[in-house]
Image: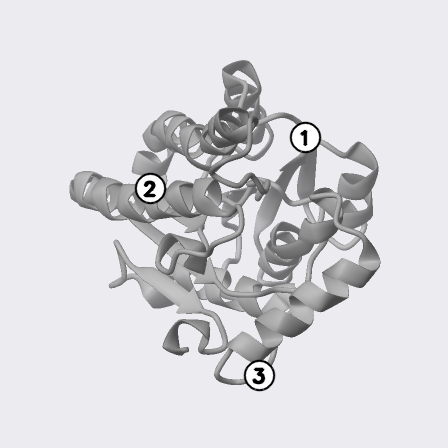
Amino acid sequence: MSLLNKVAIVTGSSSGIGAAIAIKFSEEGAKVTIVGRNKEKLNNVAKKLGDHLVLTADVTKEEDAQRIINETVKKFGQLDILVNNAGIATIAKFEDDNLMTVFDDIMKLNIRSVVYLSHIARPHLVKTKGNIVNVSGVAGIKPFANGFTSLAVSKAALDHFTRSVALELAPNGIRVNAVSPGPVYSDIFENMGVNKEDESGFYESMRQSTALKRISDPEEVAHLVTFLASDKAKAITGTISVCDNGLLLS
């Protein structure tokens, strides 16, 4: 097991990619703190875990972020891996009146919370020579129209944060990487308020946009995150690993 006795925090782990990462980490021997805002969904994920801690929290609130770190270290005695997965993808076109509200909300969760949580996790990661994995997205590399500008800017910022902080933390033996998924089956459209018919249309359009003509399951992203978080990737830092079924090739 590649993560035996490691202690990990996975934000946004009540469903989708975050839940898949937490479950895979547990299968690989890690002790996992799962974090989200939906307690019922978190408890359903927790049933599939070994040694774990469930925390209902909002990572955009600094007091909640502090609680996540403090309670994890209190329970497990250390911190080896931080996975910053929590994020939102609200649509707002550039002419929409709510553009700046959406922009601020997205930046607050998708980048500011990542910077702060990584910042306060650093002293503990120094002790274990641990690592950080950020979950980004191909929108940070390839812009998408029709209301995704705020998301794209946040993911581009997250990619550059990953590279910058990897360089800054390297002298401490801390690795920092990101994964950049393309289309993945999840509840993202449900959370955006998209109806089922439109959701199916979106998925089919995205499938056709990939070179491999397929959409990933969350577990596929979890396998990549697990590799980057493990000692098998001890020479890898500052990378943005794309898993998009060839979307960026089109």
Q: Is residue 34 above or below residue 137?
A: above
User: On the rendered structure, is 102 left or right of 43?
Assistant: left
Q: Do residues under tags 2 and 1 come within 8 Å of each other at their CB atoms?
A: no
Q: Quadrant of the N terminus?
A: bottom right
User: Mark 3 or mark 1: which is in front?
Assistant: 3
Amino acid residing under circle 1: Leu
Residue 129 seen: no
Q: Position of residue 239 (x, y in %)?
A: 29, 59
Q: Do residues under tags 3 and 2 come within 8 Å of each other at their CB atoms?
A: no
User: On the rendered structure, is 85 left or right of 120?
Assistant: right
User: On the rendered structure, is 236 left or right of 57?
Assistant: left
Q: Quadrant of the C terminus?
A: bottom left
Residue 36 or 79: which is nearer the viewer?
36
Q: Residue furthest front?
A: 95
User: On the rendered structure, is 75 left or right of 249?
Assistant: right
Q: Residue furthest top?
A: 63
Residue 248 seen: yes
Instruction: State how far apart marks 3 and 2 are (Cα).
Output: 28 Å
Q: Do residues under tags 3 and 1 come within 8 Å of each other at their CB atoms?
A: no
At label 3, counting other C-alpha atoms closer than 10 Å, the crowd grade (few under 14, some 14-19, many 20 or more) is some
Can you identify the residue that label 1 sits on?
Answer: 55
Residue at left offset 75%, top offset 59%: 198
Can you identify the residue that label 2 sits on?
Answer: 157
- Helix, strand or loop status at disc 3: loop
Hey, which quadrant is residue 246 in on the image? bottom left
Instruction: State how far apart marks 2 and 1 are (Cα).
Output: 27 Å
Residue at left offset 43%, top offset 34%: 114
Amino acid residing under circle 3: Lys
Q: Which mark is residue 213?
A: 3
Q: Earlier in the sequence, mark 3 or mark 2?
A: 2
Q: Position of residue 86 (x, y in %)?
A: 56, 40
